[in-house]
Amino acid sequence: MKFRTKGQSSLEYLMLIAGALLVVSTVAGLMFYMANTAKENAQRSIDELYEEMGGDKGGDKILLMDDFESGTMDSWAVVDEGNKGAPSKWRVLNGELQQYSNIRDGGKSIEMHGTYAWAGESDWRDYTIYLTLRSTDDDAIGVMFRYKNADNYYRFSMDRQRKYRRLVKNVNGNFTVLSEDTVKYKLNQDYLLKIEAIGTNIKVFLDGEKIFDESDPGIASGAIGLYNWGNKGSYFDNILVERI
Ligand SMILES: [Ca+2]
Ligand SMILES: [Ca+2]
C-alpha cells in the first residue's frame, strides 16, 4: 500500500516534470519561431518559387548567378546618373548587395535617373531573371534588362512614395511607359522578382503573381542591371539569369 502510493506520487511527479518541460520547450520553440519566421518564410518561399517557376539553378542554361556570399560585387559595374545625393554607395553587406545613398535626379519625368549596377552580355536575348529585392527606404527600386548601354534598355521599377510599379523602355534615350499600376510595395519585405523576356514578349512576376505582360519589339538583347532612385535602403540578392 505504501509502495503503491509512493509509486503513484513518483509517476505524478514525473508527469509534472514532463508537462513542465513540454510547456517550456513549446514556449521556447514559439519564441524561436517568432524570431526567425520572417527570414525562414522568405527563404522558403524563394526556394519554392524558384522551383514553381522552373528555375533549376544549375546546368548550362545559367548565364549569371550571384548570391553575394563572396563578399564582393566584382561582376558588377556601377553607373551613377542622378546628380542629387551623388555619388552612389554600393557595398556587399551580410551576403546581400546594398546601395545606401539617396542618389537621384529631379524626379520630374519617367526617366528617374538614379544609380545602377549592371552585369552580363549585350547578346543575351531570351532569358529569365530571378532575384530578391527589399527596400527600407520608400523610393524606387527595380531591375533593368536587355541593357545595351545607358540609352537603351527595359526597366521594371516600383516606388512606394510615388505609388507606382512600372515597366518602361529607354530607346536612344527616349523613355516610354509600357505598363503601369499604382500598387505600393511593402517596406522591408523581401520580394521575389521574376522577369521573363522571350522575343518581343515581356512578363513581370512579383512573388509569383504575374503583374505585367507586354509585347514590345524595342530592344532584342542585352545585359541586366540592379536599379534604384533616391533609395538609400536598397537590397538585392539571389540573382539568377537563365537562358530560355
Ligand atoms: Ca546572399
Ligand atoms: Ca529616399
Image (cartoon, rainbow, N blue to C red):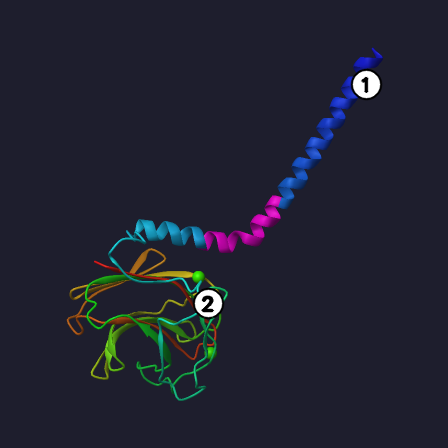
Q: Amino acid at mark 2?
A: Gly
Q: Quadrant of residue 113?
A: bottom left
Quick check: 237 above or below 23? below
Q: Amino acid at mark 1?
A: Lys
Spot occupied by residue 125 in the image (x, y as percentages of width and height)? 19, 66
Q: Residues within 10 Å of mark 2 (few under 14, many from 20)?
A: some
Q: Which residues are magenta?
A: 29-42
Look at discs 1 and 2 and give the one toward the viewer: 2
Numbered badge on residue 6: 1
Residue 164 visible in the current orientation: no
Query: Which residue is tagged 2?
Result: 71
User: In the figure, is residue 122 to the left or right of 4?
Assistant: left
Spot occupied by residue 119 in the image (x, y as percentages of width and height)? 31, 71
Spot occupied by residue 126 in the image (x, y as percentages of width and height)? 20, 63
Residue at (15% x, 71% y) in the render: 217
Q: Please, which residue is most extreme toward the top here?
A: 1
Quick check: 79 above or below 243? below
Provide the secondary structure element on which disc 2 rests. loop
